[in-house]
Image (cartoon, rainbow, N blue to C red):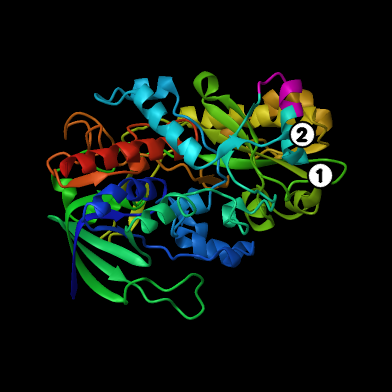
C-alpha cells in the first residue's frame, strides 16, 4: 500500500469540495499540501455529446437510477470532477431568511451566508437570461402561470456563453455552465491544490483515509486518474468530507462513527419531484434553449415549487404513468410537449435517513408523509391549470385517475387530481436536491457538526456539503452549499493561522 502525507484532504469536488479547495489556496502558498479526492472521472468538454443513456452511465451514480430502499424513488447524484455541478441546470438561489432562521443553529446567521453566497454569484457569473434566450417552454409557463393567478419568478443561472444546447443535465458541451469544474477547481489547481480523480475513499480513521484509485477502463469516458491505480493510505492533519449526502454519511457509518454520533444519517430530505407534460397543438421549442428559466414558489403557503424543465425522451417516458395508448399518445407528441417539474418541500422526519450497508454503499430509507402527498397533489393541480391557461389541449397528470386530462376537463381539476391517487412505486418520483444526514447543531444529542461543519468530538474532521442541512431548504441548495463550505474553509484556515 502506498502512503501519502498531506496537510488537508478534501473528499469530493462538487459545490462543497470545489469551494473548499479554492479557498485553501493560501495554505498551499504557505507551504502546505492540500489534496482533493474525487471518485468520478475528469471529463473533456467534447465528451459531453448529449447521448442520453451513455452520458447518464458516465455522469451519475448507478447511471442515474439509484433507488431508495423500497424502490419508490430515484435519487440523481452526479459523480465527476465537479460533482453534481456538472449535471445540474445552473440555477443559483440565495438561502431564504425564514428557512435559516427555522434551522435555529447557534452561530449560523443568514446575513453571513448571504455575504458569502454573493461572492460565488459574482465568481460564477450568475445572472438572469435575457428575454431573447427564453424558449417556448419557458415562455408558455410564464404566460400560463400569470393567467392562472400565480406569480412566476425567473431563475438566476450560472452560465457564460450559453448556446442553448439544453443539455445541462448531461453536461454542457460548450463549457458554458460555471460549476466548480469550470471556476473553483481550475483556480485551486492553478494555486497548487492537487486533485485526484477516480479515487474511492473506503474508510476514514484518525487523521487518515484508506483510498483506492481505480484504473480507467478502455471504453470509459474521461481521463485516467492523476495517480497510479492501487490502494493508498493518506495521512492528513485535517479531513474535510464533501462527498454529498450519499457520500459523507455512509462513509462515516462505514468507518464506525455512528457509535459516537447518534444523529448520523438522520434528517434526510430531498424535494420529491415528478414531471408533468402538457400537449400543445403545434410544435414548441423545448429541447433547444436553456431548460430552466422560471419557477413558482408556493413552499411557504402550500409546500411545493413548480419549475420549468426539459427532459429527454427516455427520462420523459419513464416519468409518464400508464401503459399502451395512454402513454404513447404523449410520447408521440414529444415535439409539442410543454414540461413542468413539481417538487414537494418535504420536512425532516425520524424515519427518513441515509445509512450504509456492510460494504459502505449508501442506503436511503424514505417514507412519503401525508403532507408530502398533499403537496404533490396541490402542485399537480397548479401545474395543470398553468398548462391549460397556456393553451395545452391535454395534460398528463400522475395524480389523476386516469392520468390523462383533456382541456374540456379543466374545470374538474380539483376533483380529478387527488393525493389518494399517489401510491409509492406506481408514480415515477425522483429527487436531485439531497440534503441532511450530518446536520449542524449544538452537540451530539441534536446534531453531527457545529455551525462551522466541525464534527462533534473530532476536531480534525469537518463536513462541507448538503448533509450539513438540519432540514430542507425548499430551493435549489447549490449556493447555500457553497456559502457553508466557505465557512468550513475559513475554519480550516484559522487552524493554521
SS at circle 2: helix
The tally of labels here is 2
- Apparent side of residue 335 relative to residue 1 in the rendered image (left or right): right
What percent of the width, then of the height, locates residue 46? 60, 66
Do the residues under discs 1 and 2 have CB atoms within 8 angstroms? yes
Q: Which residues are magenta?
A: 143-151
Question: Mark on residue 140?
Answer: 2
Is residue 146 covered in magenta? yes
What percent of the width, then of the height, locates residue 426? 57, 46
> Which residue is found at the position 62% from the left and 61% from the top?
52
Quadrant (top left, top right, bottom left, bottom right) of the N terminus: bottom left
Is residue 75 in view from this perspective?
Answer: no
Instruction: Find the residue positioned furthest to the bottom.
Output: 218
Question: Mark on residue 284?
Answer: 1
Above-or-below relation of 117 to 32: above
SS at circle 1: loop
Location of residue 491 (image quadrant) = top left
Location of residue 434 (image quadrant) = top left
What percent of the width, then of the height, locates residue 75? 47, 50
Amino acid at each position: 500500500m502506498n502512503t501519502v502525507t498531506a496537510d488537508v484532504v478534501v473528499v469530493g469536488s462538487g459545490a462543497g469540495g470545489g469551494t473548499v479547495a479554492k479557498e485553501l489556496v493560501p495554505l498551499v502558498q504557505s507551504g502546505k499540501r492540500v489534496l482533493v479526492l474525487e471518485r468520478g472521472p475528469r471529463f473533456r468538454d467534447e465528451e459531453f455529446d448529449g447521448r442520453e443513456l451513455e452520458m447518464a452511465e458516465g455522469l451519475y451514480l448507478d447511471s442515474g437510477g439509484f433507488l431508495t430502499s423500497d424502490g419508490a424513488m430515484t435519487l440523481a447524484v452526479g459523480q465527476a470532477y465537479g460533482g453534481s455541478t456538472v449535471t445540474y441546470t445552473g440555477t443559483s438561489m440565495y438561502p431564504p431568511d425564514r428557512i435559516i432562521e427555522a434551522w435555529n443553529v447557534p452561530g449560523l446567521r443568514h446575513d453571513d451566508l448571504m455575504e458569502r453566497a454573493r461572492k460565488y454569484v459574482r465568481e460564477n457569473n450568475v445572472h438572469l437570461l435575457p428575454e431573447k434566450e427564453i424558449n417556448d417552454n419557458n415562455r408558455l409557463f410564464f404566460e400560463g402561470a400569470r393567467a392562472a393567478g400565480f406569480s412566476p419568478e425567473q431563475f438566476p443561472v450560472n452560465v457564460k456563453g450559453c448556446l442553448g444546447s439544453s443539455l445541462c443535465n448531461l453536461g454542457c458541451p460548450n463549457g458554458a455552465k460555471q460549476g466548480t469544474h469550470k471556476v473553483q477547481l481550475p483556480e485551486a489547481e492553478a494555486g497548487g491544490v492537487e486533485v485526484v480523480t477516480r479515487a474511492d475513499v473506503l474508510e476514514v480513521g484518525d487523521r487518515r483515509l484508506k483510498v483506492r484509485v481505480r484504473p480507467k477502463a478502455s471504453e470509459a469516458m474521461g481521463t485516467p486518474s492523476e495517480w497510479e491505480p492501487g490502494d493508498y493510505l493518506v495521512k492528513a492533519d485535517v479531513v474535510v468530507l464533501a462527498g454529498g449526502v450519499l457520500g459523507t454519511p455512509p462513509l462515516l457509518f462505514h468507518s464506525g462513527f455512528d457509535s459516537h454520533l447518534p444523529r448520523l444519517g438522520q434528517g434526510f430530505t430531498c424535494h420529491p419531484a415528478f414531471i408533468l407534460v402538457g400537449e400543445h397543438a403545434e410544435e414548441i421549442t423545448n429541447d433547444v434553449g436553456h431548460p430552466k428559466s422560471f419557477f413558482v414558489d408556493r413552499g411557504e403557503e402550500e409546500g411545493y415549487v413548480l419549475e420549468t424543465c426539459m427532459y429527454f425522451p427516455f427520462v420523459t417516458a419513464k416519468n409518464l404513468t400508464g401503459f399502451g395508448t395512454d402513454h404513447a399518445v404523449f410520447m408521440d407528441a414529444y415535439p409539442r410537449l410543454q414540461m413542468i417539474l413539481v417538487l414537494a418541500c418535504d420536512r425532516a422526519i425520524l424515519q427518513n435517513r441515509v445509512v450504509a450497508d456492510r460494504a459502505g454503499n449508501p442506503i436511503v430509507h424514505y417514507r412519503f408523509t401525508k403532507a408530502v402527498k398533499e403537496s404533490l397533489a396541490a402542485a399537480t393541480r397548479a401545474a395543470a391549470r398553468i398548462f391549460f391557461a397556456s393553451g395545452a389541449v391535454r395534460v398528463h397528470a400522475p395524480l389523476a385517475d386516469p392520468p390523462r386530462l383533456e382541456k374540456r376537463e379543466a374545470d374538474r381539476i380539483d376533483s380529478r387530481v387527488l393525493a389518494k391517487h399517489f401510491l409509492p412505486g406506481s408514480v415515477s418520483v425522483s429527487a436531485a436536491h439531497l440534503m441532511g444526514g450530518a446536520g449542524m447543531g449544538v452537540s451530539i444529542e441534536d446534531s453531527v457538526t457545529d455551525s462551522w461543519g466541525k464534527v462533534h468530538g473530532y476536531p480534525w474532521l469537518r463536513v462541507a456539503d448538503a448533509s450539513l442541512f438540519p432540514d430542507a431548504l425548499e430551493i435549489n441548495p447549490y449556493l447555500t452549499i457553497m456559502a457553508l463550505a466557505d465557512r468550513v474553509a475559513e475554519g480550516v484556515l484559522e487552524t493554521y493561522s
